[in-house]
Each structure stands twice: as structure tokens, then as C-alpha cells.
Amino acid sequence: MAEKNKLELLGLTFQELTELMRNFGQPAYRSRQLWQGLYRERRSSLEQLTNLPLSLREQISTQGYSIGLPSIQKRFTSTDGTVRYLIEFADGQTVETVWMPEGDGGEEGDGSESEARSYDRATICVSSQVGCAVDCQFCMTALLGLLRNLSAGEIVGQILAVLNDQQVDIESQRINLVFMGQGEPFLNFDNFVKAVLLLVEGVGIPESRMTVSTSGIVPRITDFGQLTVRPKLAISLNASNDSSRRELMPITKKWTLEKLMAAARDFPLRNRERLTFEYVLLGGVNDSVQNAREVVELLRGLKAKVNLIAWNPGPEIPYTTPSPERVEAFQQALIRAGIPTFVRKPRGRDIFAACGQLKRTTDLVSIS
């Protein structure tokens, strides 16, 4: 288990770094240098902050500070190029973060290092909590329960660790972020929001390339809509009526579909923006054409699109993946009603990196 560092620089805003440098008796430009080193240059240790004087780096270390970048404990590589990372924090807790390359070199190749780096763009699936308390019955992460929230620095740190491992040039390669990993981001709302600001202002990833998924924390959907800087919003629907959703997503007992859809209708969309609704199709449970018709009624009048996800199997989860024919019938029922509907291609299913499969399953796959 790693030793817990009491004070970590990663996660501090520019204003907080400025105050820190002032307390150290340093001129204001040192905070800008430190900010650049942490977020844009993605330095992993104080020794690498060579734009700062050695005496200042020693002072920072003596005061108990470290950068706080998490470490990659294990990585697993899929046949489709997806990489599932087991990321370890200073207290020894771990989460999973997923790298999904797209474009040239993203789907095929011989697995060589040079070819693995050849891609036009990539998506990183980010975790917000260690485990999850929402307890969706079809999700492997639910089996962990909730251990703790991640700090803003730990959320950002996952992304920086993956960017460093993949040798990404943020200026020339398009990186998208989806906050759809382990945990419910809106149950760690303040840290999630702070992380987004650090990613936009520090790392240089615009919020237009970010999407956050919520299981339906209604008050936070309202709060999220008031933010000046915010990613796109996706809502995990996964059922077409309250009785089914209560079985699949117990959180529905607190926030019914009526309350959830009211929050969705009140959500302030930007120009050309649509709400995304995600729907995991479970064979014989929620995948009938009648279910699709009920979804049409739920979304009627909303500026929305739907992503369909054929359930990704996992140990201890008692569901089945629907047939392609049932998935197609469900999709076409929505499209005929005028709702843009897409079937999400599973990525990394063979290494338990696909949607709903993140559970630190280190004993089930081979390390790349």
C-alpha cells in the first residue's frame, strides 16, 4: 500500500497555488510556473518541475507537499485497442479508468508500441468514486459498494496518468472525456465540478469534449444546469416505467421517473445541444418494443437522443444480452418516433472494460 501524502498539489486551483507561493515568500509568477508544470506539462514529481528553482522545490517538499499524481498499478489491453487501467491513489485505494482510441490505428493493428500510438482521437472513461452506492442491479461496480469519494485532484490525476502513459500531445490529439466510470459523479458533485474546471483551465480540455452521466440525482441535475462551465449531460434511463426502474435502479424509489423527467425538461440546453439518455438493454427484461414505445412517451417533446447499450456480461450479474434482432427492433421503434437513437458499440468487453463492467477484476484477465 502506498504511503498517504498529507498535502498534494494536484487538485489546487490557480488561486490556491498563488496563495501557497505567497506564503512561501515567492513572486506571483512562480504560481503560474507551478500551475503550468502540474496541469499542462503533467509533471509527475517535484524533481521534474525544473522551471522552479531547486531551493523552492526543496521548500515545497520540506513543507510536506507532493504532486500527488496517482500510479498505474496494472493495465489490460483489449483486442480492439481499448486499455483498462487500475489506478492507485496515495492511500492504496484503486479505481479503473478506460482509454478508448479511435481513428487510424484505433481498431486494428499488430499491437506494437508505434502502432498503438497511431490514432486520430481518443476517449477516456473517468471514475468519480471508489466503488458506487447507487446499486444498479446490472452493473458490476455496484458489487463493490461505496468506499469513498475521489478528490478533485484524484479525478484529474487519473486522466493525467493515462495521458502520460499514452504519450498524448494535448495540442494535436483530440481527447474526449466521459465521466461514466466507477461511481455516481453527482454524489461527489463539488469535487467533480472542481475537477472539470481544472481540466478546462489547466489541462486544456474544453468542456464541449466532456460528458457526465448520472443515474438521476434530481437536485444535482438542477444545480448542474446553472453552471457556467459544464460538460454535456447524459441520463441513465435503463427502464421505461417506474416499477421496472425501481427493480433495476433502486434510486428510483427516491427520485421517480416523473421527477427525473421534470428535471430533464427544465434543464437549460445550449444551442444545438441535446440531452443524452442511456438505456442498457437486458434480454427479456426491458428490451421489448412495448418498452420502446413507453420510452417514446417519456421523451416526447424533449430535445434528446438515445444511446442503446446491449448489456455487457459480468460474473455475479443475473442478466442476459439481448439478441441483435431485439436491439434493432427497439432502436427502430424510437427512430420511427423521430428520436435519434444509436447502438453503442462495446469497447473492451473482453477485458471487462465495457460499460457496467468496471470492478477491479484483476483475476479475470491477462495483463498486457
Image (cartoon, grey):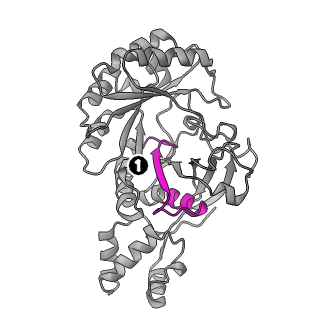
Residue underneath mark 1: 209
The image quadrant that residue 33 belongs to is: bottom left
Q: Amino acid at mark 1?
A: Arg
Q: Position of residue 231 (x, y in %)?
A: 36, 46
Residue 123 counted in the magenta span: no
- Residue extending furthest toward the front: 104
Q: Residue at x 62, y 47 (%)?
A: 106
Q: Is residue 196 left or right of residue 42?
A: left
Q: Is residue 298 above or below residue 159?
A: above
Label 1: state its secondary structure. Answer: helix
For the N terminus, the image quarter is: bottom right
- Residue 234 screen position, x and y as percent: 39, 36
In the rendered image, the residue lying farthest to the top is 290
Residue 158 on the magenta segment: yes
Q: Is residue 20 visible?
A: yes
What segment is highlighted magenta in the picture?
157-184
Residue appearing at x 45%, y 63% in the figure: 171
Residue 8 visible here: no
The residue at 56%/20% (across/down) is: 282
Q: Residues within 10 Å of mark 1 (few under 14, many from 20)?
A: some
Who's the residue at 26% across and 34% down the image? 267
